[in-house]
Image (cartoon, helix red, strand yellow):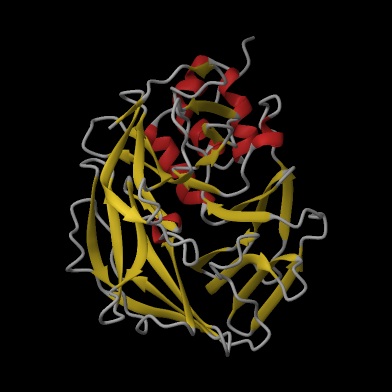
Amino acid sequence: MAPAKLPSELEEEILIRVPPLSLARFRTVCKPWAMLLNDNRFINNHLALARACPQFIFATKSKIYSISINFDDDPKTKVCKINLEIPGLESYIDPNFYHCDGLLLSTWRNGAVVWNPWLRQSKWIESKVKISGLCGIGYDSSRSEKSYKIVGYSHFWRNDHSGVYGRVVIYGFATNTWKYIGPRYKVDFITKQPILYNVSLNGNLYWTDYNLDTGECFIRSLDCSKEIFKSFCILPCKKKDSSHSHALAGFNGDRFSLLEQCDSTRKIEIWVTKNKINIEDDGEAVVWIKFMNVSRPNFPMLYNRRDIGSCSSYLVDDSIYGKSFVACCRDETRQPCIYVVRGDLFKKIKLYYVVDPFCHSVYIPSLIPIPWMSSDQENNKNIEV
């Protein structure tokens, strides 16, 4: 007698609840499962469930970890080391990295490496011209299928020795080329470039900026489809000054959250956008609502652009347990920690296993299978000016 077979609908309901690392191995079980795990509808449903148990990726100079957090009455973390399966990669990789659709991007040698930590897929993109650093990863949303693009920058001295200038550079997977976009800009090594601290949403990159004359804070964006820079919307926070730090993040997968922290009191205010951000939005109709406050005198500073030794990340969530704020950062002793704040709950979880002083964390939702990704190294064309 042939074994009974579960209905396909029930199989999907079971698979959609499987953790990403295990789900990646199931792709080899049979062709129907492989097709299902590559289906966009399945991916989106899996992402929606994954947000109920958020994941941080935490990197040091030598190791990369996945840290999952539950939101029950006693929040706990689960740590899993990620094996990238690229010989020698951990010796070269820059712990500062960016993400889009669950993909991670980092500088590697003279170029970039993109990988999906859940599916253990990777791709190395080499540049024949020196790239000074990377800014993020987005995609061309005007195409029927997502065409991913890497955004970086190149610094160079002016011939008249008047200072260091830069150009934004972009790599397209569809064309397999690097090219410059936008005008040259004067490099400020003290405040860094705002585009380095961005959020990838709907394929575009967004970051906070401010008007030098008025001090008014707003969001700027890079349209990765048209490859142009533009202003997006005004922020609800205080005017820019040296006593406050700002950070932009994603919320519920299709909206923004904004964090403002006072340097002296350490008080945190958080806003979220009322409605989802669409690719067609010009920012004029964006409405911000206050999400929550965090008032703890001993709370660490989350974002200090002068501290190049580490980078924090945060997320906010509104679930059946209430409004929650989670931060992955260093405490006053420089020990990496996870902070969970919800109502009267305040919990600090130290990550004792991290001994490397240089660390970086970022929140990502879950897996996205990308068919073009492989461990093969490909030759890439020179940069186009």
Which corner quadrant holds the N terminus?
A: top right
Please give the name of the residue rendered at 59% of the width and 36% of the height, measured from the top-left corner.
Answer: 118
Q: Nearer the viewer, residue 114 or 127?
A: 127
Left or right of 337 on screen, residue 284: left
Please give the name of the residue rendered at 60% of the width and 37% of the height, measured from the top-left corner.
Answer: 117
Rendered view: 145 above or below 164: above
Q: Nearer the viewer, residue 260 or 272?
A: 260
Question: How many discs appear?
Answer: 0
Tell me residue 169's x, y (percent): 35, 40
- Quadrant in the picture for residue 3: top right
Q: Nearer the viewer, residue 31 or 60?
A: 60
Please give the name of the residue rendered at 37% of the width and 61% of the height, measured from the top-left corner.
Answer: 207
Residue 276 visible in the picture: no
Q: Nearer the viewer, residue 304 or 369?
A: 304
Tell me residue 314's x, y (percent): 55, 65
Tell me residue 60's x, y (percent): 70, 49
Tell me residue 289's x, y (percent): 34, 78
The residue positioned farthest toward the top in the image shown: 1
Which corner quadrant holds the C terminus?
A: top left
Left or right of 300 on screen, residue 98: left
